[in-house]
Image (cartoon, grey):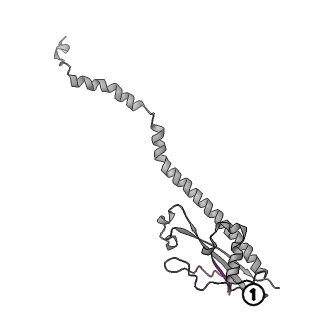
């Protein structure tokens, strides 16, 4: 009895807090929107990852197509089916672009270089300080028929990218947002 006498009379505000208690507990136990929130947190990295896989797949496919076309053209140069006497630089470039596999390339943006080199050592990529290709000394200059000279065929192409991976690289080749692709074949001309 003494206990009840010391109890203070209930207040209206105090009663409202006690009424909220079960509602708060119910709110804590409810997980109706958890899947939507979890998906929202995971969606952006997931789609970036899928986009990167898609971009790399396209890049490797296009690179493989370009390598195949360059290997075919190198074979025709090596066997003297295409020479400086039978084709000009523009005709050689058009001949390369006329291959069915090269349909996905804009041939105006292809840079083609055929040169005689002294050895099979790497001649290097002619780059300007700003990262672009230096095409000043490039052209269509294969060795003469039956000369057994060592030739190199190089084809350059800037492939446009749709994801801005270039922002993560300090390489000036990525400054334009495109990916520089290169395919080359070194070979010795066959005797006639």
> In the visual, does 52 lie left or right of 70?
left
Residue at x-position 32% and y-position 26%: 21
Q: Quadrant of the C terminus?
A: bottom right
- For the magenta stretch, what is the residue range? 109-137
Find residue 60 and report its image quarter: bottom right
Query: Percent position (x, y) of residue 5?
Result: 16, 14
Q: In which quarter of the image is the N terminus?
A: top left
Q: Compared with residue 151, is residue 173 higher up or lower down, i.e. above or below? A: above
Residue at x-position 58% and y-position 56%: 53
Q: Label 1's element?
A: loop
Residue at x-position 49% and y-position 73%: 172
Q: Compared with residue 37, is residue 68 higher up or lower down, i.e. above or below? A: below
Query: Percent position (x, y) of residue 92?
Result: 70, 79
Residue at x-position 49% and y-position 52%: 45
Residue projecting furthest to the right: 192
> In the visual, does 152 lie left or right of 10?
right
Query: Percent position (x, y) of residue 160?
Result: 56, 66
> Observer-nearest residue: 3 or 50?
50
Find residue 154 and report its image quarter: bottom right
Q: Compared with residue 72, is residue 11 higher up or lower down, i.e. above or below? A: above
Magenta-drawn stretch contains 115: yes
> Observer-nearest residue: 27 or 88?
88
Query: To which residue does mark 1 refer?
Result: 85
Instruction: Tally the marks.
Output: 1
Q: Residues within 10 Å of mark 1 (few under 14, many from 20)?
A: few
> In the visual, does 18 lie left or right of 128?
left
Q: Compared with residue 128, is residue 162 higher up or lower down, i.e. above or below? A: above
Query: Percent position (x, y) of residue 100?
Result: 72, 67
Q: Main secondary structure of the magenta part?
A: loop
Find residue 149 and report its image quarter: bottom right
């Amino acid at each position: 009895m003494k206990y009840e006498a010391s109890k203070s009379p209930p207040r209206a505000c105090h009663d409202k807090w006690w009424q909220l208690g079960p509602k708060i507990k119910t709110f804590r136990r409810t997980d109706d929107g958890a899947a939507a929130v979890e998906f929202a947190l995971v969606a952006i990295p997931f789609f970036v990852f899928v986009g990167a896989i898609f971009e790399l797949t396209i890049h490797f496919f296009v690179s493989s197509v370009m390598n195949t076309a360059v290997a075919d053209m190198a074979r025709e140069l090596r066997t003297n089916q295409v020479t400086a006497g039978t084709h000009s630089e523009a005709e050689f470039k058009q001949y390369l672009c006329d291959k069915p596999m090269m349909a996905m390339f804009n041939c105006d943006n292809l840079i083609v270089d055929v040169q005689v080199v002294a050895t099979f050592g790497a001649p290097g990529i002619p780059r300007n300080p700003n990262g672009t290709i230096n095409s000043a000394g490039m052209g269509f200059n294969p060795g003469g028929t039956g000369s057994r000279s060592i030739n190199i065929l190089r084809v350059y192409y800037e492939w446009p990218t749709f994801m801005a991976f270039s922002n993560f690289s300090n390489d000036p080749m990525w400054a334009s947002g495109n990916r520089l692709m290169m395919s080359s074949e070194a070979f010795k001309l066959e005797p006639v």
